[in-house]
Amino acid sequence: MSETVTRSQAATRHHLTGAAQLVDSLAPLLRDWLPRQRWFAGKGRPVTGFAPVAVTGLRAAAAEPGLLHLLVDARQPGRDTDCYQLLLGVRRTVPPHLSDALLGRPRNGPLAGLAVYEALHDPLLAGHLLDLLRTPGTQGALSFERPPGPAVPDGLAPRVLDVEQTNSSLVYGDTYILKLFRRVAPGTHPELELSRALAGVDCPRVPTPVAWAGAWPPGAAEPYVLGLLQPFVAGATDGWTLALRALADGAPFTREAAALGRATAEVHRALARALPTAALARPRTKALAAAMAERLDATARAVPELRPYAPALAAAYTALRALDDTRRTVQRVHGDLHLGQCLYGADRTWHVIDFEGEPARPLAERRRPHPAVRDVAGMLRSFDYAAYTHRAPAWAAACREAYCDGYAEAAGHDPRAEETLLRAYETDKAVYEVLYEARHRPDWLPVPMSAVRRLAGARP
Ligand SMILES: Nc1ncnc2c1ncn2[C@@H]1O[C@H](COP(=O)(O)OP(=O)(O)O)[C@@H](O)[C@H]1O
Ligand SMILES: O=P(O)(O)O[C@H]1O[C@H](CO)[C@@H](O[C@H]2O[C@H](CO)[C@@H](O)[C@H](O)[C@H]2O)[C@H](O)[C@H]1O
């Protein structure tokens, strides 16, 4: 037994030494390329070092192209280390259609002189990834899993989804979509957890995963979820695009908003069937209010524009702290519901996607139960966002009412009746958005700031 342990420890050490050399040789390329990616979470600070978490050759370099899977820690001053998932192609020469995907050629190490590029843009390697997902198995620290069900066909043409996203997605033949998480951490991932749980209670609003990938690197206390494959909603347009189109045409959006309210309520009912719920008693409201107040303080420290409004915003959390109503419940929720997460399909119904929660928060925090009204607040904020672009507050107000009407019809209770909760969650969401925009899209900061002024009772 002890010999086995010693041998496996030696093998792990050997593997990590090789992995460290490889990552060291890639570091100059990554230092330049990583911060330019949309999904890079540590914008504005330099990357000072990389360390391997797991390195897996998914296809030998000699196979031309080779496919390398990396989980790599990126160190940045003043920020906890983030682990990123990278898929790198390796070729002697890069064909013209992949030239934009090139990271560069390492000067030394095992890949010295070879071209290293973002593998997702290479149809051959994207096809290889689908093959791995189609057949359950393991490779190094990585595992590929499938629930029982019909086989996923092979040979589906891949394309990288060209949208602003937190992660990266590949569409296969307009039949499936593979979402690869970029910033990863060990632990249960809410998106896989919730979409699988919903599959068990028959909720056609949410696509059911047909395969997923994970990793259990040596030394990790828990496995990492790396990505999931799910059916592609055919002919879909997202709610954000539809809302902006309606605004540009001077058209109302209340019918769509009401249908979205009904869809949200259906998803909430299904989540409450699938996973435990609990009473919203005093200790919980106090804890929720305390967490919101803490987020407000942290955001006010990071974003000076928010500071003058912080005391008035905090009043919403004081009211929440005093709430004690055991008739109300907490349950698992979407956690980052907005118009962009709702797809209106060719089947003329709304589908809800992206159950990963607010990507900046730790996994455990994203999995906490909340009153369902939290998602309602997220969507109400989204109507405000859309209307801001067209200076159309009346349009937003009409959508917000229609959405709540639709929700009330399908849920059997009106979210507007939960005034204290709704106000606290809308405030918390606006505060989250202030930080999100300040970090990712500073030009958009005025959008949540206008809500902050309204919620703080100041003149707009
Ligand atoms: N099941 C699906 N069917 C069709 N399109 C999808 C599906 N899932 C995601 N998409 C598209 O991919 C985009 C990004 O997906 P999302 O899960 O929101 O990723 P991220 O969390 O990285 O923002 C969506 O805005 C949508 O356009
Ligand atoms: O990338 P995700 O979709 O997981 O969510 C993050 O990015 C969103 C922006 O892309 C951000 O949403 C905010 O902007 C939207 C308009 O672009 C608006 O509809 C939302 O209401 C607003 O919150 C989201 O907060 C963030 O987590």
Image (cartoon, helix red, strand yellow):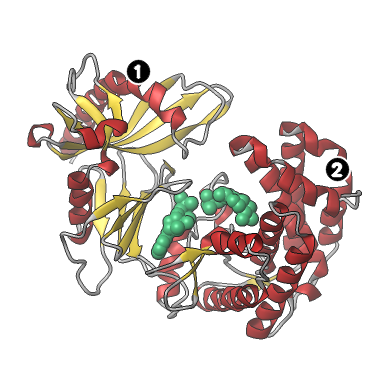
- Residue in the foreground of this view, choosing between 346 and 365: 346
Q: Quadrant of residue 184?
A: top left
Please, is residue 108 above or below residue 58 in the view? above
- The residue type indicated by label 2 comes to Tyr
- Residue in the foreground of this view, choosing between 190 and 40: 40
- Residue in the foreground of this view, choosing between 178 and 350: 350
Residue 303 visible in the shown view: yes
Q: Which secondary structure lies at badge 1? A: helix
Residue receiving disc 1: 28
- Residue in the foreground of this view, choosing between 10 and 304: 304
- The residue type indicated by label 1 comes to Pro
Residue depicted at 65% across the width and 36% down the height: 442
Q: Quadrant of residue 282?
A: bottom right
Q: Residue 273: percent from the left, percent from the top?
A: 53, 79
- In which quadrant of the rendered image does the N terminus lie? top left
> As drawn, is 320 to the left or to the right of 402?
right
- The extreme front residue here reads 249
- The extreme top residue here reads 107
How much space separates mark 2 and mark 1, taking CA atoms?
A: 43 Å
**Mark linked to residue 309:** 2
Please, is residue 119 above or below residue 259 in the view? above
Q: Residues within 10 Å of mark 2 (few under 14, many from 20)?
A: some
Q: Residue 368: percent from the left, percent from the top?
A: 59, 59
Q: Which of marks 1 and 2 precedes in the sequence? A: 1
Residue depicted at 26% across the width and 60% down the height: 145
**Mark linked to residue 270:** none
Q: Residue 119: percent from the left, percent from the top?
A: 26, 39
Residue depicted at 25% across the width and 51% down the height: 143
Q: Which secondary structure lies at badge 2? A: helix
Residue 2 visible in the shown view: no
> As drawn, is 450 to the left or to the right of 85?
right
Q: Residue 91: percent from the left, percent from the top?
A: 16, 30
